Amino acid sequence: MATNISTRPRSNPYAPNWGSKIIKALTNFVPTLVAIVVFLLIWQLLCSGPNATLPGPIQVLQDTWDPLIIDPFFQGDGTDQGLFWQLAASLKRVAIGYFLAAIVGIALGILVGVSTIMFRALDPIFQVLRTIPPLAWLPISLAAMRDAQPAAIFVIFITAIWPIIINTGVGVQNIPQDYNNVAKVLQLSKPKYFVKVLLPATVPYIFTGLKIAIGLSWLAIVAAEMLTGGVGIGFFIWDAYNSGAISEVILAILYVGLVGLLLDKLITFIGKLVLPED
Amino acid sequence: MTAFVVIDHVDQVFPLPNGQSYIALKNINLEIRKGEFVSLLGHSGCGKSTLLNIIAGLAQPAAGGVLLEGRQVTKPGPDRMVVFQNYSLLPWLTVRQNIALAVDEVMKHLPAQERRDIVEQHIDMVKLRQAADKTPGKLSGGMKQRVSIARALAIRPKLLLLDEPFGALDALTRSGLQDQLIQIAQEHHLTCIMVTHDVDEALLLSDRIVMLTNGPESYIGQIIDVPFERPRERMAVVNHPNYYALRSEIVYFLNQQKKAKQRKVKQAAIARNGLEKINLEIGFVPLTDCAPLVVAKEMGFFQKHGLEEVTLSREPSWKAIAEGVTSKRLDAAQMVAGMPLALTLGMGGKVPTPVVTGVVLSRNGNAITLSKRLYDEGVRNLADLKGALAAAPDRVHTMATVHPASMHNLILRYWLASADIDPDQDMHLTVIPPPQMVATLKAGNIDGFCAGEPWNTHAIKENIGFVIAHDLDLWIGHPEKVLGVREDWANQYPQTHLALVKALLEACEYCDDRRNRPQIAELLAKPEYVGAELEYIRAGFLDPYDRGDGKPPEQLLRFNQFHIDITNCPSRAEGLWILTQLARWGITPFPRNWIEILDRVRRMDVYGEAARQLDFPDLEPNREPFALFDGTVFDPDDPIGYLNSLRIKREIRIEEIDIDHPAIVVAA
């Protein structure tokens, strides 16, 4: 038998080798790449006429290469900051508003989910308020806060909170009856029920809410900053438009899109860490 | 205070969206002893899980209540732990954490180390050591259910409730877990209530099987005591002589429920031809002596007497016949001779249901068959049998009869007792439906039986038994099968009852003409009637009777007697003999008012009227003492003196039996 062992090939025949891994990565990636190239080509073609109102991709790249792309960390006076700082300022506002919305939203969601009376009392109000477009809140919040910075954060908060409340509430109401029966039969204490049953069972719903909310808040921040001014990617876009620098607008929009995608992925990633596998 | 759990007149009602309400359970009454394993069995939607939830406290009944150790159940609690059908493990906790959650919460008073030990001990008990740190998502269904059982047992519930615990598992996993549950339940003396729809599972695990009827308004249709001894083992249970009889009884119940669901609206009585009801459902058991019913139907005697829509319902056992008549499912039925009396007296602690008989359908026709093994041991007659019993005192000899109130049981006991064999002490007697006798004898689960044909001949032809005695050796011309109807039915449809008796009298006369018998035998062999080989049916009925003991077959002209020699008269003296034997063996008390009972049950008036209308002689046998094969004289004027003179007997209860105002029966 020993000969058998020594003659057996060392490598695991079922493990994919490097070649096939690369091929697999390419097959995933190539269509995306092709689509981007085709998109850029069409864009370039559409905007290469003499009457084109918008710059083509090459034009955008030429206009913004120096200093916007190569020096994102530039720090000047007032609103004259590199794109990194513009994005960072926006993200900070989103982070504060979103964080507050998450805390208040989850708490209110659980309240509405657990108590039928609270559900009946609050749900109609939520349903009306959640349909109000984010920017419609801005005048009220400016009037109330008398300052652009907290007003923008409030808009983020009020935009992000509804999907969190509603999804959390649904999650609590949908805790499988089986889990509740187990808790009832064991006569679990209230705090223990909350920690061991309610919260874990609701987490998937909470994360659905959080994911929707992060997308909405990023949408809202750009609009809010356009109106409130100050350092931030929204005002940067508005400012660039007013100066006729369309290429800068396009670059900033691209950055907004990429950051939005990253934020979404970030919440999904955190959700994966927290959620039970089953 | 013997009951551990009392389910006291529980009703459950659910409101419907249209404002009406759905009555799921109606008047459920059940008492459960400590350490008992009870199964709730029924079709889906019969409310068995609803009942379990009420016991668990997860739902409140609309009326009535549940007591556990004398305290009312008002909310769920760990003393009534539930093993849910879908396991209900928390998926975000590991196996260990799931069990620990229960233990930590319920056993707060114990030190942490002790609680940990309990958790570990139960992980080992269900053999999940390897999977202790896995989450339920990574376990198979069987493993999940084991965790669920471990979690339930770890908190030491007073009562374990199992809701179809193995329903979702494959057969192999299921049987493994059932074995484990038997063992655990036995070791810890658990009191369990299990909901199931699996007949074999219920038989394997339970001490009692409570069968619920279909909803709406489900009630307890029947409770079956499972007599298998504990500790129990799968193979021992399956090989128990009563296993298939019990199993078929349960399956029969479930089939009845299914039929009832399909039937829903029972056909109303159709009155025609001057009769109150011409659409009758008449029960019979597949035996050669069901011939009068088959002949009346096939040869048009029912039709002739105006009963145009008679359906013959083939029933699997005599118990099913009794149930069918008392539950009003059947209008009438072929019955073993003692059944109308036993039902009227309330046999087996049941509420007395007066049942009357206006005609005896057949006499003789039975035989006592013993296994080939006893033949090989040299048993040829009763004395040899006694010798064989004495020679093997450690072996339990089991014999089967078809119903406690049947002549088979009474004559077999009489026969055994005549040789000083106590049928209950020296042997074990059990009840098995006639069509299952041969299979049970073949399996070696019984050593012999007393039944009608063709089942004795079948055993002989299979070469697994021989006839040690038949009716002509024991009591020539004893009443064997009678027509039984409920007394209230007979009072409601007197003309129909009379027409039925007349049709059967003519059919009986037809059956006794030997020229007709070849044709009758062929009718009987049909699958919708007896469904046995023609050759088996002809034996004794037409052909010489082979006892299977090597002697040449002999022609027995009176083996099946349907008409001659006043066969059809339900004479009261014979009824009285039956009453004495029912009392002798403790099957019913002996009624002090026996004259009244016999007068009501054995309807000589109906018989006489029918005979006169048909120009048959309206004769009753002479009222004089008679004797069986052993010569002991039975004097119909002194039944109690006769009972007292018998040597082997059970304790005899003599009671005044008031049929119309039965004493309220209190369940033990």
Image (cartoon, coloured by chain):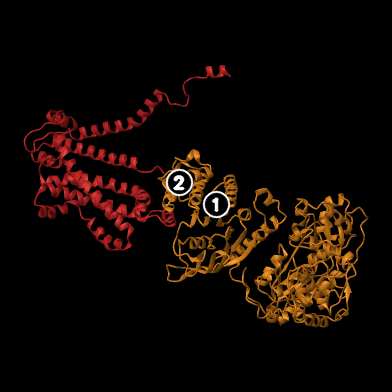
Chain colours: A red, B orange
Residue B256 is drawn in which quadrant? bottom right
Check disc 1 and give the amino acid type: Gly
**Sequence-earlier tag: 2 or 1:** 2
Q: Which secondary structure lies at badge 2?
A: helix
Identify the residue at horizontal 12%, vertical 29% (top origin).
A67
Q: Residues within 10 Å of mark 2 (few under 14, many from 20)?
A: few
* Residue at numbered disc 1: B167
Labels 2 & 1 near each other (Cβ < 8 A): no
Q: Is residue B175 left or right of residue B632?
A: left
Task: Point out residue B206 in the picture as x, y percentages from the top left corner.
Answer: 61, 56
Task: Point out residue B89 in the picture as x, y percentages from the top left corner.
Answer: 45, 49
Task: Point out residue A131 in the picture as x, y percentages from the top left corner.
Answer: 23, 56
Q: Nearer the viewer, residue A101 or A181?
A: A181
Mark drawn on residue B114: 2
Which chain does the residue under circle 2 lie in? Answer: B
Task: Point out residue B577 in the picture as x, y percentages from the top left corner.
Answer: 81, 73
Q: Is residue A227 left or right of residue A131?
A: left
Residue B575 is drawn in which quadrant? bottom right
Gap in Å between the C-alphas at discs 2 and 1?
Answer: 34 Å
Identify the residue at horizontal 71%, vertical 64% (top origin).
B315
Count of numbered marks: 2
* B186 to B487, vertically: above or below: above
Residue B507 is drawn in which quadrant? bottom right
Q: In the rendered image, which quarter contains the N terminus of chain B? A: bottom right
Check disc 2 and give the amino acid type: Glu
Q: Is residue B561 left or right of residue A170?
A: right
Would residue A51 be seen by someone viewing this image from the given angle?
no
